[in-house]
Image (cartoon, rainbow, N blue to C red):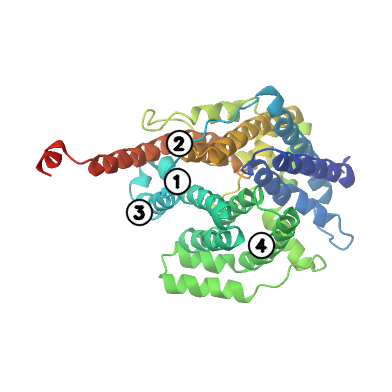
Amino acid sequence: MSEHSFLPSLILFVIATGLVARSMWTRRSIGLGGVYMLQLWILYASGACLRALPWAGLRNTSVALDGFAVSAYGAIAFAAGWCIRPYLFPLRSPRFVKQNPKLPGLYIASGLISYFLLKPTIGRLPTLQAITLVGAQLALAGLCLGAFLNWQRGGWKLLLKWSLPALLFPLVTVLHQGFLGYGVAALSMFAVFCATFVRPRWVVVVALVLAVYSGTSFTIAYLKNRPALRTAVWGGADWRTRIDELAKTVSIIEPFDVRNRTDIEIFNERMDQSPLLGLAVDRLSERGDYAHGETLLNALIGLVPRALWPNKPVGAGSGGLVSRYTGLHFARNTSVGVGQMMELYINFGTASVVVGLLVLGLLLGYSDEKAALLLHSGNWPYFVQWFLFGISFLQVGGSLIEAVSTAGASVATGHIVNSIIAARARAAERKKIVPAGELQAV
């Protein structure tokens, strides 16, 4: 039976969210902290809130409360790191740099090329896989940059026009990969990014609440029809068949109802990570067989490109960590993400969760303000590099090795793309210069 109660953990979550939100709106920010807290709410706090409803009657509630309590400690530690970072590592605004206004379009084009052309081809090769995956995020970076510039130029009218393509992220990832989460994560980043500069703020708050509710309703419908959708996508069905399955999903959308036990059960079964974390907490409290830094070392090893270390003993993904530390066994070919919270816990317990999330808060806080200062100073290429680096750590439901290796790939990808764009710009400038011989002829 759990020794933890629901209310204290919820209070910690609310305080952590308030601290991060207030910090984002009182200094320059691109919203990384807001997206991280949003994912913590989706994966841990939302399920716990639904379990607290008198009519929910879900199984493993006491175990889930154990996991929720640990996630609450992590949330408040993340908020602490986010808020104290400016005092430990202060940043100064760089000088203003005038850039090419066509850069947003170039980044979007680069991202689309990487996602649709490079990822299915050369992206299958070692090391290049990570680079092409990060390269696809350039489309998100370009959309965010374009939204910021168009808000400055024309306010709501231009921003709304620029925002429409962002709504396609979930549709593209569902139809192309069979996964909704990737597209929702990108759309969430875009929405929170815009929330950092759009005014008035009450409109932003209302819009975000409506977006979360609408997204939850769509997610429930998607989960109901997910097997058929994935059968079509993974089975190589043509685009018409895939779109038909997506249309069926849209046709069964109903407003999410907290009084509907079916909706609650579907959400908790697929989204709530508190029970898994709670099982790991209970199992380790009995056995004490912690990882003692094993997965943290593997995350650092993940920084080494496989092109330099072909037989590298670690790879992306969670492996069998969830089964190993929860005692659960899953169907073959079923992938269950360990999540950053559980991975930190299985190393040294609650202490490693607190320290790990504190460090993540410091790191994301630094990346966030650095990217924001570069954005507002007009240094957009370096903004994109820091943007890519920062969103690498937003994989809350994934493993640390995925976050760290993606961060490493983001540094390489940003440098490569910016070098290509800069080289093209220099070549274009040279073409504008009239040769001396032509001047003499004139």
Q: Are the residues flagged by discs 2 and 4 in contact, CB closer than 8 Å?
A: no
Structural distance between the alpha carbons of marks 3 and 2: 18 Å
Give x and y (percent) for residue 295: 59, 30
Please provide percent x and percent y for residue 150.
53, 54
Q: Sequence-wise, which precedes: disc 1 or disc 3?
A: 3
The tag earlier along the polypeptide, 3 or 2, is: 3
Picture coordinates of residue 13, whole percent (x, y) = 80, 43
Q: How many marks?
A: 4
Q: How far apart are labels 4 and 3 at the CA level?
A: 29 Å
Decide: few, some or many residues near mark 3? Use Cα within 10 Å; few <14, some 14-19, many ≥20: few
Distance (Cα) linking label 2 and label 4: 30 Å
The numbered mark, 2 or 4, whose residue comes first in the sequence reads 4
Residue 328 in view, yes or no: no
In contact (CB < 8 Å): disc 1 and disc 3: no
Tag of residue 117: 3
Quick one: label 1 or label 4, which is nearer the N terminus? 1
Query: CB under 8 Å between callouts 1 and 4?
Result: no
Earlier residue among tags 4 and 3: 3
The amino acid pointed to by label 1 is Leu
| Camera-side residue of 180 and 104 | 104
Reply above or below: 304 against 234: above
Residue 418, relative to residue 293: is it above or below? below
Instruction: Look at mark 1 in the image and give the residue it sits on.
Output: 133
Mark 4, residue position: 215
Q: Where does the N terminus fall, quadrant-wise?
A: top right
Q: Of residues 102 and 173, which is closer to you in this image?
A: 102
| Of residues 135 and 274, the one drawn nearer to the viewer in this rendering | 135
- Residue 248 visible? The answer is yes
Q: Report the amino acid beneath label 2.
A: Ala
Tell whether 120 sits left or right of 58. left
User: Which residue is labeled 2 in the image?
Assistant: 409
